[in-house]
Amino acid sequence: MNYSTIDSDVLIIGAGGGGLRAALELDRTSLDVLVVGKREFGDAHTVKAAGGINASFGNLDPEDNWKIHAADTLREGGFINDPRAVELLCKKVPDRVKELREWGCNFNLTDSGSIDQRYFGAQSFRRTCFVGDRTGKAIEATLVDAIKGTNVARKQEVVVTKILTEEGRAIGAVGYDKKSSELLLFKVKAVLLAAGGYTQIYSRSSSRPHENTGDGPALAFDAGARLQDMEMVQFHPTGMVKPEEKLGSLVTEAVRGEGGKLFNTNDDRFMERYSPQKMELDARDKVARAIYREIEKGNGTEAGGVYLDISHEDSESVRERIPGIVEKFREVGVDPTSERMEVAPTTHYSMGGVKINFETGKTAVEGLFAVGEVTAGLHGANRLGGNSLAEVVTFGQHVAVALKEYAKSVSNPSAPEAMIKSGLAEIEDIRDGGGDNDPGELMDELGRVLWKHAGIVRTEEGLKQGLTRILNLRERANHIKAVDKINSERFDRAVELKFALPVAESVVRSAIAREESRGAHYRDDHRERLVDWKKNIEVMGSPEHPELKMRNVEKIPDTIKQALKEGYELDYHHLE
Ligand SMILES: Cc1cc2nc3c(=O)[nH]c(=O)nc-3n(C[C@H](O)[C@H](O)[C@H](O)COP(=O)(O)OP(=O)(O)OC[C@H]3O[C@@H](n4cnc5c(N)ncnc54)[C@H](O)[C@@H]3O)c2cc1C
């Protein structure tokens, strides 16, 4: 079998905000670092992040501080977040944002020259720092610029298909070059997984194709790591509904943060009935469910949406503060400065993922670390808007510290030939197929199954039907058509399917187990949040034989408890 070997000290799988921020930190050491990603360098899912990044500077609302940020994060997360992770995030993120500004990230500023901050859903104060509505793009570009001129090696358009382990230690990975089709072996001392989430396994998603297909959690689980809270999938209230090719594309929360209002087809501002206090800026799960219910009742548009209206605001300010949305809708013939937009919920963020220790970024597998959306625990049952960019830069820097200590303390592993061969043989197996099924069709079917059976509103019966269909898809996935070329759409889809299926199964199994409603997980047959369920669900075992284990959450530190008691809450009517 022909393959190229690449030696390094640390392999970072993922070139989004998390992977790049970690790489910068590791560059300050004597370690050789290699970052790989599926797209061109500088183009990762992070560039899609729009509305902003949270840091409690209190530039507009001086009462804000890290403790209230932590309290908001825990409340939104349904109190199953890892409290220590929340504390670390909220204390450290202001320094990371300042540093981004020093590195050239052009945040919008107030008249006095401090970073401007906007409202975002379910936050007590204006805390979200932004670069118009292209914040992720600006942050990714800043990190890419900072990496130029460092010793960090980059390899783009590479797909990792397996993390290699020997005696329970991660020692490398195998994959292929998407352009040349060359098979690759990476031999390293440590692996940092920064490969993003799994929302694209749903048929309607705010991600682009071939992103967030569950590669990260699947790679880690296959290597022996644990997954956690896989049932917690965030449905963003506002995605586009038409035209068909734009279905699910995000309409950022910044539109509502800047004063956007929701109406049904009877011209009823329905959030007055669902959430009279917080209105359109209530938590994402609540607004998404309200829209879902309105559409279900027949109060939706023909295309299956409701209206989002910001045309009452000053058009110049709308153009300046949410330029991306104005452009996106104008492309399809709608001018948001004078017309209503049609929107409906879309799958947006995976709170579940790889279980890590947030102090170190360590997974259950020695030498395998993880950071960013691929991990679970920080956001609990639901994520505050603006907390993911905060997470990737904060923990990118933070986990690199422990990773560097680890990589310096271990010797170069030897990768046994048999192990390498079996890793590479899995790629050949996918290519050889063994049946007639088209991987793209199976992947599309999986998306529809998840949207229908494990979507915004779930029931035991629906979830069980979903599980049966996923198990059937797993069986059919063993018999796909042979693929002649590695650098082909069909081969990519076959690899994605291999990752997506075990991830989908763990989403559904965990959703069946959680017999309550909490955060983004809503069970129509168990509508209450239950004290007994203040637990995380871990997925252990192997992709072939997953097992679930419930674990109590850690105690909330007293400092944050105090902020929770004080009960800060956004006074929505400020905005009117
Ligand atoms: C439309 C949209 C708007 C958003 N807006 C905001 C916002 O305003 N604020 C906020 O905080 N968050 C926002 N988010 C969420 C946020 O963008 C993401 O959670 C965050 O960027 C994730 O960063 P990451 O570094 O963990 O992973 P990603 O940016 O997803 O990067 C993953 C990397 O891993 C690589 N990869 C994946 N699989 C493999 C593989 N098998 N082999 C090799 N490489 C692989 C990818 O190519 C990529 O380079 C938004 C998300 C979307 C979709």
Image (cartoon, helix red, strand yellow):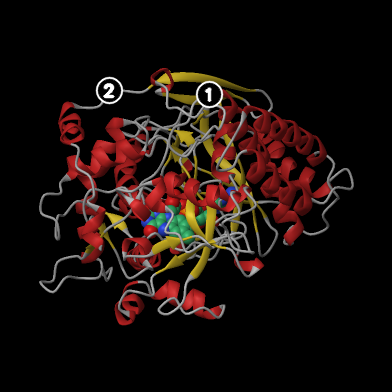
Identify which residue, 6 or 361, lies in the foreground.
361
**Label disc, if present, on residue 555 of the rendered structure:** 2
Query: Label 1 is placed on what type of residue?
Result: Glu
Q: Indicate whether 90 appears above or below 261.
A: above
Q: Is residue 465 left or right of residue 101?
A: right
Numbered disc 2: secondary structure: loop
**Is the residue at mark 2 in contact range of ligand 1, meaning its CB lies under 8 Å from it?**
no
Residue 399 appears in the picture as rendered: yes
Which residue is at 15% across, 35% downward?
A: 566
Identify which residue, 394 or 243, lies in the foreground.
243
Identify which residue, 47 or 419, lies in the foreground.
47
Residue 73 in picture, x, y percent from top left: 30, 41
Q: Is residue 210 left or right of residue 259?
A: right
Numbered disc 1: secondary structure: loop
Viewer-side label of 1, 2? 1
Residue 22 appears in the picture as rendered: no
For marks 1 and 2, the one nearer the N-term is: 1
Residue 448 in picture, x, y percent from top left: 69, 48
Q: Indicate whether 336 appears above or below 471.
A: below
**Label disc, if present, on residue 460 of the rendered structure:** none
Quadrant location of residue 429? top right
Residue 554 in picture, x, y percent from top left: 32, 23
**Label disc, if present, on residue 515 of the rendered structure:** 1
Query: Label 2 is placed on what type of residue?
Result: Lys
Alpha carbon separation for disc pair 1 and 2: 22 Å
Q: Indicate whether 99 appears above or below 410.
A: below
Q: How many residues crowd around disc 1 within 10 Å: few (fewer than 14), some, or many (20 or more)?
A: many
